[in-house]
């Protein structure tokens, strides 16, 4: 019998990787950038749990499962070079842990050279001697710390004038602008997640627990081709939906509940982040409908504000004003806008931000503030738009009939030259949700 195929790298992926490395090399201005794979911390007792790659190493290498690898981008010594160091294939290890990419497999990835990991100690010090800056992740990344400490610094070489800088700002700004290949992947991640949300809307019942619903959601993601969730799925019924990062997922669904699911798969490493809220009985109560309509109207309004040049604080300000004014107009709360704004009182029903960058990380890399100014949107950025209203079960601001209603609606939005493209195609109109629950 023939062995099953190893991981294949598509021509489109290799081209995207080469282009992004070239752009970064050009910006390095004589410096070096070193990114290491995440060490495999996932061993417990004698077993491994699912490994998650370091997103920066993955962004530069395209390798998702190799837990021993280093990318070195070098503009040192007058030439631009992209180098990959990986562990040699170890046939004994492969019997236990499966196939390794090895030097041969990695040679398809379009680097200028692929070396064995052992060569890093020979090549890196010389390039460091000639560079003025080394961008890396030494503070937060045990993999890099180990490499620099064990391989380089313990050799007691003095690197005169070499400044070691954290790369999150530098590299994050590249990651923030997605290329066409990444946008395709993020769109696919959204399609898979939307199908999973829809499956839950259709198949939930009051006899189920939140945990069963989570299983159904994640089954659909796996069937769709994504083995990973982008974060722990939030499946919250009834008043649990008022807890923003609820993840116990242990209660039974009860008649009259709203179900809030905030969940997305990671497809080829790229996150989706979708929230939908719907009635388990298939019909919103009068109070649930009032709050839902406010959140939906606000979400559509904020999405329409997305365009190049707009900024997150403008979206946040408009969200606070609109949610609060609508709650006042619907007589859900009986305080004035001024009182709601004073001491951030509105945080009692809207305590979070409306948007964040999205990409390889759910809260993606890339600076939010540049030269002291909040960053303006540019084509190629992907953001979330996620307003919500949460009337806590003991809220002093409303009558008790509103208590325990928590609603968030979240879509993933690509900034385009013309404005925006909504990557999330998942039911959110009241009529759609009620119709889905009744089939
Ligand atoms: N799922 C986390 C968030 O929406 O930011
Ligand atoms: Mn989000
Ligand atoms: Mn979310």
Image (cartoon, rainbow, N blue to C red):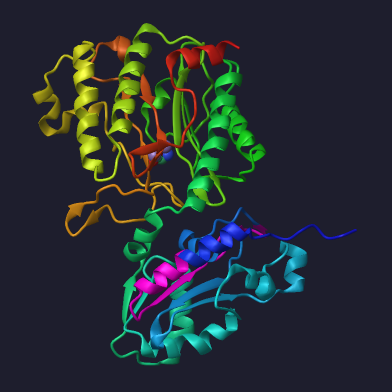
Residue placed most toward the observer, 141 or 283: 283
Q: Please state if 378 lies on the left or on the right of 145 as rendered.
A: left
Q: Residue at x 9, y 25 (%)?
A: 338
Which residue is found at the position 19% from the left and 20% from the top?
A: 325
Front position in the image: 396 or 388: 388
Which residue in the rendered view is the most extreme toward the right? Answer: 1
Does 404 sit above or below residue 369?
above
Describe residue 47's horizontal placement relative to residue 370 as left or right. Answer: right
Provide residue 186's location: percent of width, then percent of height: 50, 45
Q: Is residue 241 above or below residue 40?
A: above
Q: Within the displayed image, which quadrant is ligand 3 positioned in?
A: top left
Residues drawn in magenta: 20-47
**Where is residue 71 drawn, in percent x and y?**
50, 72
Query: Is residue 125 at least partly visible in the picture?
Result: yes
Query: In this orientation, which residue lies closer to the viewer: 387 or 44?
Result: 387
Q: Residue at x 55, y 73 (%)?
A: 111
Q: Vertical placement of 269 versus 9: above or below?
A: above
Tell me the quarter of the image containing the N terminus: bottom right
Q: Can the viewer see residue 137 in this picture?
A: no
- Quadrant showing the C terminus: top right
In the rendered image, residue 372, in percent from the top left (x then y), is placed at 16, 57
From this view, report whether residue 369 is shown above or below residue 226. Answer: below
Q: Magenta segment: does it hold 264?
A: no
């Amino acid at each position: 019998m023939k062995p099953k195929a190893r991981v294949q790298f598509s021509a489109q992926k290799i081209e995207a990787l080469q282009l992004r490395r070239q752009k970064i090399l050009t910006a390095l201005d004589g410096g070096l950038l070193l990114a290491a794979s995440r060490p495999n911390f996932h061993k417990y007792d004698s077993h491994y749990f699912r490994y998650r790659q370091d997103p920066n190493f993955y962004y530069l290498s395209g390798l998702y499962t190799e837990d021993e690898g280093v990318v070195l981008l070098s503009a040192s010594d007058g030439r631009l070079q992209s180098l990959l160091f990986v562990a040699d294939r170890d046939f004994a290890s492969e019997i236990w842990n499966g196939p390794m990419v090895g030097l041969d497999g990695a040679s398809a990835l379009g680097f200028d050279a692929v070396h064995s990991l052992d060569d890093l100690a020979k090549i890196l010090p010389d390039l460091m001697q000639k560079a003025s800056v080394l961008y890396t992740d030494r503070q937060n990344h045990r993999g890099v710390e180990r490499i620099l400490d064990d391989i380089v610094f313990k050799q007691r070489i003095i690197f005169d004038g070499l400044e070691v800088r954290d790369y999150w700002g530098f590299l994050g700004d590249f990651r923030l602008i997605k290329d066409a290949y990444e946008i395709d992947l993020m769109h696919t991640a959204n399609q898979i997640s939307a199908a999973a949300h829809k499956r839950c809307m259709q198949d939930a019942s009051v006899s189920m627990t939140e945990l069963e619903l989570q299983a159904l959601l994640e089954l659909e993601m796996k069937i769709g081709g994504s083995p990973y969730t982008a974060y722990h799925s939030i499946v919250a019924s009834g008043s649990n939906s008022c807890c923003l990062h609820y993840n116990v997922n242990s209660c039974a669904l009860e008649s009259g509940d709203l179900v809030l699911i905030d969940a997305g798969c990671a497809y080829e490493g790229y996150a989706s982040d979708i929230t939908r809220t719907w009635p388990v009985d298939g019909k919103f109560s009068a109070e649930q409908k009032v709050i839902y309509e406010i959140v939906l109207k606000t979400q559509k309004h904020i999405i329409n504000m997305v365009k190049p040049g707009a900024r997150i604080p403008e979206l946040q300000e408009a969200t606070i004003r609109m949610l609060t004014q609508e709650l006042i107009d619907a007589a859900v709360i009986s305080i004035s806008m001024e009182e709601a704004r004073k001491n951030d009182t509105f945080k009692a029903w809207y305590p979070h931000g409306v948007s964040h960058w999205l990409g390889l990380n759910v809260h993606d890399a890339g600076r939010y503030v540049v030269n002291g100014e909040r960053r303006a949107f540019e084509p190629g950025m992907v953001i979330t738009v996620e307003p919500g209203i949460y009337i806590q079960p003991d809220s002093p601001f409303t009558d008790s009939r509103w208590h325990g209603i928590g609603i968030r609606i979240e879509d993933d939005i690509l900034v385009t030259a013309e404005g925006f493209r909504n990557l999330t195609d998942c039911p959110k109109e009241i009529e759609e949700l009620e119709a889905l629950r009744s089939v």
